[in-house]
Image: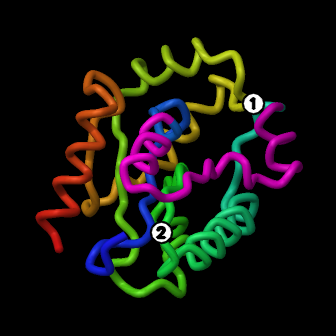
Amino acid sequence: MDSSQPDIFIVMGVSACGKTTLGKALAAELECPFFDGDDFHPPENIVKMKAEEPLGDSDREGWLKALNALARKHTGSGGAVIACSALKEKYRDWLREGLAPGKICWVVLTGTFDAILERIQARADHYMPPALLRSQFADLEVPDYGIHLPAYGMPTEEMVRRVSAHIKTNR
């Protein structure tokens, strides 16, 4: 990965917005590893979500700090793409802690509640129940920075192309 580029790409947004799909495709394009933040949740968080209990800040802090450690590990060593909801600015602060400015490129996936609810209801292989989507939208603080892309209606390849173009024009 070019040293003038960010090392870490965090694909963020509410559940079922396409973070994993875009993250895997972007990692393949950038030739770096992909990590799904969902895989780093402690078991007690998964139990809460399965029980349709929204996670609070204290539930998320340890999880986000683990993802921050992962990001720091991959900074300067080929980079990484991480899919993570990163709903609040406080959470993004935890994710960027200890990283030099500009080392993270935020890829923000946005969409309407109804369209994403339709997607989440169609998923059978995930522990995140549709009932928690409203709480995610309530917590979501959309940043005014990063690359903003629609969560639906644009092919994944075009999304990857736009992120790549952004990287090239912002060196």
Residue holding disc 2: 79
Q: Main secondary structure of the magenta part?
A: helix
Image mark for residue 127: 1
Residue 114 location, quadrant:
top left
Mark 1 burial class by Cα count in 10 Å: few <14, some 14-19, many 20+: some
- Residue 164 place in picture, x, y as percent: 24, 53
Q: Is residue 76 magenta?
A: no
Give me the disc on residue 106. none
Query: Considering only vertical position in the picture, is 24 above or below 151?
Result: below
Is the residue 97 above or below the residue 20 in the image?
A: below
Q: Is residue 125 above or below residue 150?
A: above
Rendering quarter of residue 161: top left
Query: Residue at coordinates 61% horizontally, 77% vertically from top-left?
Result: 73
Q: Is 22 one of the magenta-colored residues?
A: yes
Rendered location of residue 24, percent (x, y): 49, 42
Q: Of the residues shown, which amino acid type is indicated by label 1?
A: Tyr
Q: Earlier in the sequence, mark 1 or mark 2?
A: 2
Residue 60 placement: quadrant: bottom right
- What range of the chain is rendered magenta? 21-50
As rendered, which of 118 and 166 lies closer to the eye?
166
